[in-house]
Image (cartoon, rainbow, N blue to C red):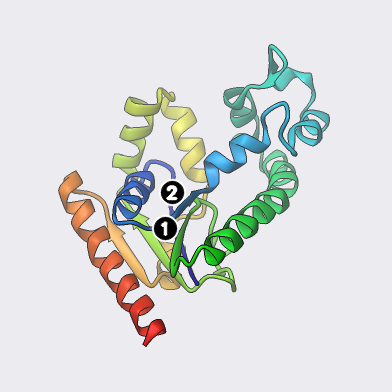
Amino acid sequence: MRIYGLTGGTGSGKSEAARRFSERGFPVIDADARAHALLEPRGSAFEAVRNAFGNAILTEGRINRAKLGARVFADRDARARLNAIVHPMLTRVIEHQCTEWAAEGHKAVIIDAALLAESSQRESWLDGLILVVCPAALRLERLVDHRGLTVDEARRRIAAQTQPERKTPLADWVIQNDGSLDELRAQVDKVADAIQADAANDDS
């Protein structure tokens, strides 16, 4: 089974691209959703994150992601501390899910994760990397209009991630998302066709 990473900065349209891959029949792991589940009161990361950041990040006994986000996106050390807790757990969750899908006979899966190739180095376990890019001004507009962030909050989130131009050389496919939704879907379809062709060659 081949594993393809789908990445892009916050507000780039990566999630919309993931939705299209799912519509095309690919199993998709939403790494953000899996990470959020780890932060739930019964999640594997809950106690460690609470111990690291204190009860100030809690609301009614649950981790308030807005409070946690405000903390880690404003402080590189805090962000590194959170990643050190969550990422190893998230990797195990992803590995387990991929093992299950391989056993079910799937030929290719998509890992939807913003933090792929963050250190200017591609993960060795990826068979391909898909990068969604979008002008910074448009990303900022989407974060403010659609997610309710302030301009300063949105800028901090964008600045906290590796800039797209550093990931571009690592990508097998670059999807430029500065047009319509139909244009984005058409680009995803071309990548999906290529992945399906590779999977067919594996069977031949």
The residue wearing badge 1 is 164
Q: Residues within 10 Å of mark 2 (few under 14, many from 20)?
A: many
What quarter of the picture does the C terminus occupy?
bottom left
The residue that appears at 36% across and 36% down in the rendered structure is: 140
Amino acid under disc 1: Pro
Front residue of 21/171: it is 21
Task: Using the image, determine if residue 166 lies above or below residue 203.
Answer: above
The residue wearing badge 2 is 9
The residue that appears at 41% across and 69% down in the rendered structure is: 171
Q: Position of residue 41 (x, y in %)?
A: 72, 26
The residue that appears at 74% across and 49% down in the rendered structure is: 84
Callout 1 secondary element: helix
Q: Position of residue 100 (x, y in %)?
A: 58, 59
Amino acid under disc 2: Gly
Query: Reading the chain from its start, which is encountered first: label 1 or label 2?
Result: 2
Q: Where is residue 146 in the image (x, y as percent from the top left)?
A: 34, 27
Measure the C-alpha gap from mark 1 to mark 2.
Answer: 7 Å
Task: Give yes or no for contact between labels 1 and 2 (Cβ–Cβ under 8 Å).
Answer: yes
- Left or right of residue 57, residue 171 in this image: left
Q: Which mark is residue 135?
A: none
Q: Where is residue 43 in the image (x, y as percent from the top left)?
A: 71, 34
Callout 2 secondary element: loop
